[in-house]
């Protein structure tokens, strides 16, 4: 199972860069058919995690992924799961 990790520690205080990085990681997961994206907003005050969750909750973004899980053992980590549609005609065809 392939996974992409996005660590936001280096850009935690740069709003536009955070949105850009989130957009890019979601698009990369879709383009490369990656099942899981791990986003690390860090622990801190929790504001960055809230920003990430607000981004993921946007209607246009929410339509792109299957579900989000918060890591129960690590408050500073989120997992975004994608379900990709299978390409037509690749499986189950008998000749």
Image (cartoon, helix red, strand yellow):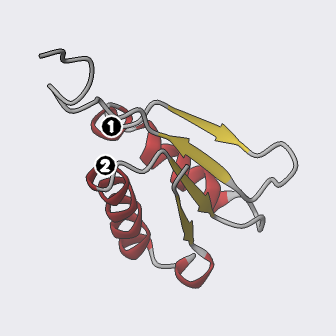
Q: Secondary structure at mark 2?
A: helix
Q: Residue at x 53, y 44 (%)?
A: 80
Q: Is residue 85 above or below residue 1?
A: above
* Label 2 packing within 10 angstroms: few (<14), some (14-19), many (20+): some
Mark 1 or mark 2: whose residue is earlier in sequence = 2
Q: Does residue 87 appear left or right of residue 57 in this picture? A: left
Q: Residue at x 18, y 15 (%)?
A: 94
Q: Does residue 69 appear left or right of residue 6 in this picture? A: right
**Residue 82 percent across, percent down from the top left:** 44, 38
* Label 1 packing within 10 angstroms: few (<14), some (14-19), many (20+): some
Q: Which of 59 and 70 lies nearest the eye of the viewer?
A: 70
Q: Is residue 13 above or below residue 45?
A: below
**Residue 87 percent across, percent down from the top left:** 20, 33
Q: In the picture, residue 7 is in which quadrant?
A: bottom right
Give the position of the C terminus as an image quadrant: top left
Q: Which residue is mark 1?
A: 64
Q: Residue at x 52, y 80 (%)?
A: 11
Q: Does residue 68 appear left or right of residue 34 in this picture? A: right
Return the residue found at the far front. Answer: 95
Q: Tell me, for residue 9, which label it has, or none.
A: none
Q: In the picture, residue 63 is in which quadrant?
A: top left
Return the residue found at the far bottom. Answer: 10
Q: Residue at x 64, y 64 (%)?
A: 40
**Residue 57 percent across, percent down from the top left:** 45, 37
Q: Badges 1 and 2: C-beta atoms under 8 Å apart?
A: yes
Q: Tell me, for residue 30, which label it has, or none.
A: 2
Q: Is residue 91 above or below residue 44?
A: above
Q: Label 1 vs label 2: CA separation? A: 8 Å
């Amino acid at each position: 199972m392939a996974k992409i990790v996005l660590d936001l520690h280096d850009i935690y205080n740069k709003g536009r860069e955070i949105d850009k990085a989130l957009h890019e990681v979601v698009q990369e997961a879709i383009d490369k058919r990656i099942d899981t994206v791990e986003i690390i907003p860090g622990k801190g005050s929790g504001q960055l995690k809230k920003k990430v969750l607000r981004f993921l909750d946007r209607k246009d973004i929410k339509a792109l992924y299957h579900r989000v899980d918060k890591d129960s053992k690590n408050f500073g980590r989120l997992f975004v799961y994608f379900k990709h549609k299978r390409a037509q005609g690749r499986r189950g065809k008998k000749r």
